Image: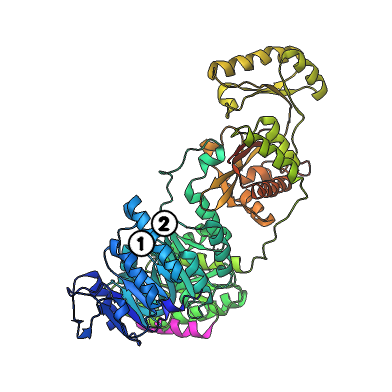
Amino acid sequence: MSLKPLFYPSSIAVIGVSRKEYKVGHLIFDNIRNSGFKGPFFPVNPRADEIHGIKCYPVILDIPTDIEMAVIVVPAKFVPKVMEECGEKGVKAVLIISAGFKETGIEGAKLEKEVVKIAKSYGIRTVGPNCLGVINTDCPYNASFTTHTPRKGNISFFSQSGALCAAILDHSVEEKIGFHKFVSLGNKADLTEVDFLEDFLKDPKTKVVTGYLEGISEGEKFIKVASKVSKEKPIILVKSGGTDSGARAVSSHTGTLAGSQAAYDSAFKQSGIIQAHSIQDLFDYSIAFTYQPLPLGRRVAIVTNAGGAGVMTSDACERNGIILSQFSSATIDRLQSFLPSAASIYNPVDVLGDSLADRYLRAADLLVLDENVDALIALLVPAAPTQIRETALGLAELSKRTDKTIIACFMGKDHVKKGVDILIENSMPNYYFPERAVASLAAMVRYHKYLISPEKIYKKFDIDKEKVKKIFEKAISEGKRYLSDEKAREVIEVYGIRIPKTKLVKDIDEADEIAEEIGYPLVLKISSPDILHKTDIGGVKIGIKNEKELRENFEDIKREAKSYMPNARMLGVILQEFIDAKREVILGMNKDPQFGPLLMFGLGGIYVEALKDVSFRVAPITDSEAWEMISEIKSYPILKGMRGEKPADINSIVNALLRLSQLVTDFPNILEMDINPLMVYDKGKGSVATDVRISLGG
């Protein structure tokens, strides 16, 4: 359903307008009156005859004309009755400002469900409850209890925090940042961030989508919609609440390492969302995307009148993956022709502190014209000779003449204000510190890279899913949460991941016989559904070379396990082919409550939780996303080969990740899973999964 009745209502009723000017209902009514809304608007209050000379009605049903949108500001217990009246009146959209719903506990949650049920029965789309309101500067109207109506612009914003909405609006006035649509989500009982993403995508007046989220209601749908929006418009989001203080109990390596923030980081990255880590970042990135064209690459030129500022900017570029341009010989010759001998003609170009506007702008012009430059950062420090206003006017003119990205950094505050005002009025972003300028440019570079990335193609392997389905169904019917070692290996073998020769034995005589079949050297592992981390209790013995060592270690491994966990169920001892591959990696999955299967990759073995050198993605993943997971970890050079070592077979790791991705996508009842370690041979020789753990839900 279209959200036009919400954003472009033909008429508005405010239900619960108080006669007291400091009350929320009165403030909202005043904001609607003062925002330039063109249609009729009505106050509803059974105890008042008029507000500001405008006739009051006891209930919305008494208003003698159609009402398309209503704003409800009455105590929570009266909201269901008011919602019924809105339905009878034919209202299409409702803002429920009132608090006292699920944010207050069980009774409030029941009340909220009742309100939603009524709204759905009448086909009413609802924002809130417990929200600050909605603003559309294009309609225009301001149906909120904020102290400011923002400037008109092309940034649309939604927020889960009403208080933050108010703070952002207050800040935007000072910074002269304009908004198009501004939405306080509240409890998201009906309309959520996904609905507004879909609306902003279709809205030609929304150029940049921004938001603040504490949680996401429908993770998988969110990724799908956000991916679609990101291909058309940048989405810049701040996500709070990323700590693991409320993490649920987990037992796998993946579950231990996968905090909620890891899932959000992965989902945002995969759907092209630019993640801002603070409200300051949100503002910084937003104005860069709003004011300037995207850079077509990551080669930047820096012009400055202060050497130190140039050095700081260069450092920030390196930290953010931005490359300093190598100028053409023609550019260098031209710079040399007019700059003083003490100036720097290489990147960053330092025109010196005594530079007037003409010298500074002449250098900036040349840098923008260089074919090796994708973007320009214009630094300016207010030295005594500096012509701030003239330099700002020249940069604004240059920005209009070129399709390259220009970002200004006029450092200081009071002395540069007259120049900054000129830049903002001419759609040029300015940052008071180089680090913020570079971070904003880097966000634009990342987004451009996402835009030109190929369409995602998910590889599908020919798998006997029915066989795996039967294994899972049998385990669940028997009340088993964890698959046995044998069955877990069988599952991944069906999915095409190579496993070593393995056999479960009950006694030493059987072990002798199986050892001859597999061949020495061997690995011994205790088999018990109750012992998850076998190495912690001495439940793994590696490099068994002969029958004598087999006998010595066979009983020892059982005794150690029994001593550690006397009540554990012992299924026997696993004999496994010894794999002499040099590198160990871990592949895992943890079922995230918002986004579903979250894949993990890192160096494997016993140190994975200590080192925490891991990467994550939400399944399913593409071939390129599997490569990204591998190359992101700090230990990636070990896999590539260091100090004369041959590179590992990274292609086989990619293959295993893709097969794991398909497995956990095919079977959503897998809750947690580790392949640790996947032993990786040298390039071209493959890899082998030696230990597998799979946890199931119902």
Main SS category, magenta section? helix
Give percent across and percent down for residue 433.
Answer: 39, 66
Q: Which mark is residue 214?
A: 2
Percent coordinates x, y for residue 461 in the rendering:
76, 51
Is residue 451 in view from this perspective?
yes
Name above or below for residue 650 compared with residue 199.
above
Amino acid under disc 1 = Ser
Please tell me in which quadrant of the rendered image residue 643 appears. Answer: top right
Q: Mark 2, residues whose alpha carbon is within 10 Å: few (<14), some, or many (≥20)?
A: few
The residues colored magenta run 389-402
Residue at the image position 50 percent from the left and 69 percent from the top: 197
Could you tell me if the residues under marks 2 and 1 are in contact, i.e. CB atoms within 8 Å? yes
Residue 251 as seen in the image, left or right of residue 580: left
Q: Is residue 393 above or below residue 82?
A: below
Give residue 690's position: percent from left, percent from top: 69, 33
> Tag 1 or tag 2, which sits nearer the N-term?
1
Is residue 348 in sight in this rendering?
no
Tell which residue pokes out farthest to the right in this image: 517
Q: Is residue 552 magenta?
A: no
- Marker disc for residue 161: 1
Say if the magenta span includes residue 400: yes
Q: 451 or 246, which is in the foreground?
A: 246
